[in-house]
Image: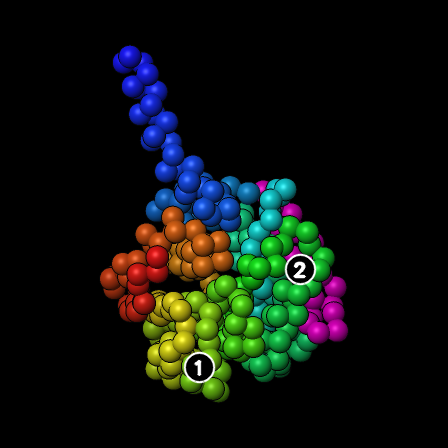
Amino acid sequence: MRIKAVLAALILALIPATATAAANPYERGPAPTAASVEASRGSFAVTSAAIPRQSNFGGGTIYTPTSDLTFGAVAISPGFTATQSSVAHFGPRLASFGFVVVTINTLSGWDDPDSRGRQLLAALDYAVRTNPRVDASRLSVMGHSMGGGGALRASVSRPALQASIPLAGWHSTKSWPGVQVPTLVLGGQSDPTAPNSQHSLPFYTSMTAAPDKAFLELRGGDHSDPRSDNVTVRKYTLSWLKRFVDNDVRYDQFLCPAPAPNTLISAYRDTCPHA
């Protein structure tokens, strides 16, 4: 009888875990830890392929996890006069955590933010057409500087996107009440090119229709820091994409409650709780 009781207890203990896994078929990779969200690589091996210049975006590189699963996708735009090399480190890193990633070149280095937004969406459409590992229902955008402004414009143009992350975003439009996409606005405290008071903060404050949003200010960060390969950017960009593209509530612990200011973060605002 004791053995039966023990077996019954084990079965009951397993039921919640099984139900949770069945409720979210989009979870990819092991449960996150404080160390894993800051790590340079996740658990998936990654392949990459060059994308030739297209009529509606400047080509780039697509990074794909080596797996038979399908994955959410994120397209990432560089800033004014920059190429995909400035955001290339996001490609293999995010792909290794379970995303198909497209880092793009723009048609011209001088393309304005709205053009970059259209090109981000074109890159996502290209990935959906050409890569069988992409789940077309789980798409997202990121961008640096004018590419970040492009991410905002893409979010307004395509509200079905699951997440948006403008990094030190620059746009002449300051009010974005039309954004209906969960958006993480990430800026540098000492950015002289896109000061937070003139860009990231007005963007964040004006997103009254966004179901979830956050503003993260990197302590001492300048214009290039928000897209750089550092542990704070790693942690929060990954957690945001996991939470909203994969609906992976295991990552909520890194976003809610909102982190207090510290030696790395000078300010953080959020609409917690998400779940």
The relative height of residue 126 versus residue 36 in the rendered view (above or below) is below
Q: Quadrant of residue 154?
A: bottom right
| Residue 63 circle label | none
- Relative height, residue 209 to residue 160 (above, below): below
Q: Residue at x 69, y 71 (%)?
A: 58
Placement of 8 over or under 161, stated as above or below? above
Quarter occupied by residue 49 = bottom right
Give the mark nearer the N terminus: 1 vs 2: 2
- Badge 1 vs badge 2, beta-carbon distance below 8 Å: no
Residue 74 x %, y % = 56, 61
- Distance (Cα) linking label 1 and label 2: 27 Å
Q: Which residue is at a point 43% across and 69% down the rendered structure image?
A: 183
10 Å crowding of disc 1: few (<14), some (14-19), many (20+): many
Viewer-nearest residue: 169 or 244: 244
Query: What's the magenta region?
Result: 45-64
Residue 151, x across and y down, in percent = 52, 73
What residue did someone put label 1 on?
Answer: 176
The residue wearing badge 2 is 128
